[in-house]
Image: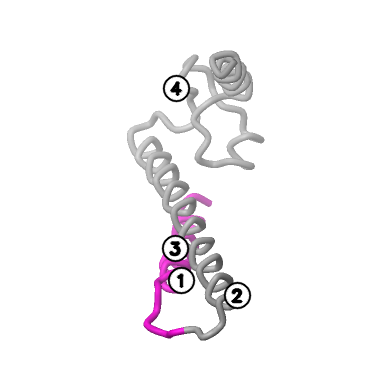
Amino acid sequence: MLIERRRALTGEVAEHMEIGRFGADRVAEAEEAAAMDAAQSTMIELADAERALLSQIDRALRKFDDGSYGVSEESGEPIGFDRLRAIPWATLTVRDQEIREREQRERGR
């Protein structure tokens, strides 16, 4: 699953970056230019998010190679099969993730 998702994301990143590149085309209407700028920004932001996910997938593949895949980085407990099937790049158990999120919310207050 990780390798298939990585392959698909790699193509999507390249496609979204190409769409997001600023072209030399001049647009006469201000509204059209603004819409084009917004669309390009959205594509670049999407490509950035996809690159971040690629990084997480690569990390999971390295963990698979070194034998630490499926083990929580916080508690050392096994990550549940259902969680890994849903999020194959997960690094925490559900419980560890909840604790981390609660701590982040409390720090944000």
Circles 2 and 1: CB atoms closer than 8 Å: no
Q: Is residue 13 magenta?
A: yes
Q: CA distance from mark 3 to mark 2?
A: 27 Å
Q: Outermost residue toward the right?
A: 82
Q: Which residue is mark 3?
A: 13
Image location of residue 4, percent across then percent down: 50, 58
- Amino acid on which disc 3 is placed: Val
Q: Answer yes or no: do the residues labelled 1 and 3 have beta carbons within 8 Å?
A: yes
For residue 73, the mark is: 4
Residue 15 versus residue 63 in the image, above or below:
below
Residue type at the position of mark 4: Glu
The magenta-colored residue range is 1-26
Q: Is 49 on the left-hand or right-hand side of 68?
A: right
Q: Is the residue 2 above or below the residue 24 in the image? A: above
Packing grade of label 4 (10 A; few <14, some 14-19, many >=20) is some
Residue at 54 percent of width and 23 percent of height? 78
At 40% from the left and 38% from the top, the residue drawn is 64
* Of labels 4 and 1, the one closer to you: 1
What secondary structure do most residues of the magenta stretch adopt?
Answer: helix
Q: Earlier in the sequence, mark 3 or mark 4?
A: 3
Specify the quadrant of the image occupied by residue 67.
top left
